Image (cartoon, helix red, strand yellow):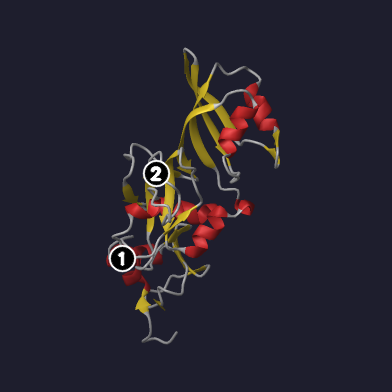
C-alpha cells in the first residue's frame, strides 16, 4: 500500500472504539498492535480495514463496520431458523427489521432455551460450528430424580449413543431438591438433541434445558427474546477460540 492509500492505523483503532487516536499511538509505540501477524510500531502505517487482521495485545479487533455480532436469548418454542414456511415462530422474526442479513451460529431445538449467536461474519460462524475447533458450550438442565455418584464419571468417560460415542467436557450438580436436580453440562459436540439424549441414557430425562454459554460468551441475566451486541472482548474471545 502506498503512502497515500488506506487509513492511518491509529485512526482505524480509534474508529473501532479501542482508544483515542493519541492513546492508539501509544499502543502502537509500545508494540502492542499487530497487522496481519506483524507488530507495527510506526505511526504512519496505513491499512485497508476491509482486508487486514489487526490484533491489540493478542486479541483480534473488529474494524469492519459492516460486521455484526449479537447474542440472542432464544425463548422456548422458537425454532432455530431465519424463516419458517409453516408459520411457526422462529429466530428470524426477532431480526426481521434489521438492515443486515444475519444467520444463526448452530442451533437449539425448539424446546431448548438460551444463548444463540447471530452474525453476518461467515468465516467466524463456520469455524465456531466446525468440530475441529472444539468450541465448548455450557448448558443448565433440570432433570428428573437424584444424580448418582457415578453419573459424572460415566459422562466424562463416554456414553455410546445410536450415532456413536460422546464424552462431556464438564459435569456438575448445581442444586438438588425433591424429585428434581439442576445440573451443568459442558461439551463441544453439536449433534442433534445431544444433551437430552445423553442425560436420558444415564436415566435422567430432561425437564428443562437452557444453554448459558458459548466459549467465553455468557448469557447472564439477558431476558428471553432479547438481543444484545457482543462486547469487543467477547468478539475477540470468539476469534481466539477458533484461531482467527
Residue 98 appears in the figure: yes
Position above or below: 223 against 147: below
**Which of the numbered marks, if any, corresponds to residue 99?**
1
Q: Position of residue 235 (x, y in %)?
A: 42, 54
User: Residue 74: which numbered mark, if any?
Assistant: 2
Q: Which residue occupies 66% across, 25% down?
A: 153
Q: Position of residue 236 (x, y in %)?
A: 44, 55
Q: Are marks 2 and 1 in contact (CB under 8 Å)?
A: no
Element type where label 2 sits in the image: strand
Quadrant of the rendered structure where residue 102 is? bottom left
Image position of 189 with respect to 210: above or below: below
Residue pushed farthest top? 178
* Percent of width and height locating residue 92: 38, 55
Any part of residue 243 in sight: no
Depth check: give the residue in front, 20 or 17: 17
Residue 157 located left or right of residue 91: right
Mark 2 / mark 1, whichever is N-terminal = 2
Q: Which mark is residue 17?
A: none
Percent coordinates x, y for residue 53 in the rendering? 47, 68
Q: Residue at x 47, y 51 (%)?
A: 237
Q: Nearer the viewer, residue 182 or 217?
A: 182
Q: Quadrant of residue 219?
A: top left
Residue 59 shown left or right of residue 22 in the figure: right
Classify 10 Å Cα crowding around label 2: few (below 14), some (14-19), many (20 and above).
many
Amino acid at each position: 500500500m502506498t503512502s497515500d492509500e488506506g487509513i492511518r492505523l491509529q485512526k482505524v483503532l480509534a474508529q473501532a472504539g479501542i482508544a483515542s487516536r493519541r492513546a492508539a499511538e501509544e499502543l502502537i509505540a509500545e508494540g502492542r498492535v499487530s497487522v496481519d501477524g506483524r507488530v507495527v510500531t510506526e505511526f504512519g502505517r496505513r491499512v485497508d480495514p476491509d482486508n487486514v487482521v489487526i490484533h491489540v495485545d493478542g486479541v483480534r479487533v473488529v474494524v469492519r463496520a459492516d460486521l455484526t455480532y449479537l447474542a440472542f436469548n432464544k425463548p422456548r418454542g422458537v425454532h432455530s431458523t431465519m424463516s419458517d414456511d409453516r408459520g411457526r415462530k422462529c429466530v428470524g422474526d426477532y431480526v426481521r427489521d434489521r438492515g443486515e442479513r444475519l444467520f444463526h451460529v448452530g442451533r437449539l431445538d425448539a424446546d431448548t432455551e438460551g444463548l444463540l449467536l447471530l452474525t453476518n461474519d461467515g468465516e467466524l460462524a463456520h469455524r465456531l460450528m466446525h468440530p475441529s475447533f472444539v468450541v465448548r458450550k455450557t448448558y443448565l438442565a433440570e432433570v428428573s430424580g437424584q444424580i448418582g455418584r457415578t453419573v459424572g464419571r460415566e459422562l466424562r468417560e463416554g456414553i455410546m449413543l445410536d450415532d456413536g460415542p460422546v464424552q462431556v467436557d464438564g459435569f456438575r450438580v448445581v442444586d438438588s431438591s425433591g424429585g428434581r436436580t439442576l445440573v451443568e453440562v459442558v461439551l463441544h459436540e453439536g449433534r442433534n438433541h445431544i444433551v437430552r439424549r445423553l442425560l436420558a441414557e444415564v436415566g435422567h430425562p430432561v425437564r428443562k434445558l437452557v444453554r448459558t454459554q458459548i466459549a467465553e460468551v455468557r448469557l447472564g441475566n439477558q431476558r428471553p427474546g432479547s438481543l444484545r451486541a457482543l462486547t469487543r472482548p467477547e468478539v475477540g474471545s470468539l476469534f481466539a477460540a477458533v484461531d482467527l
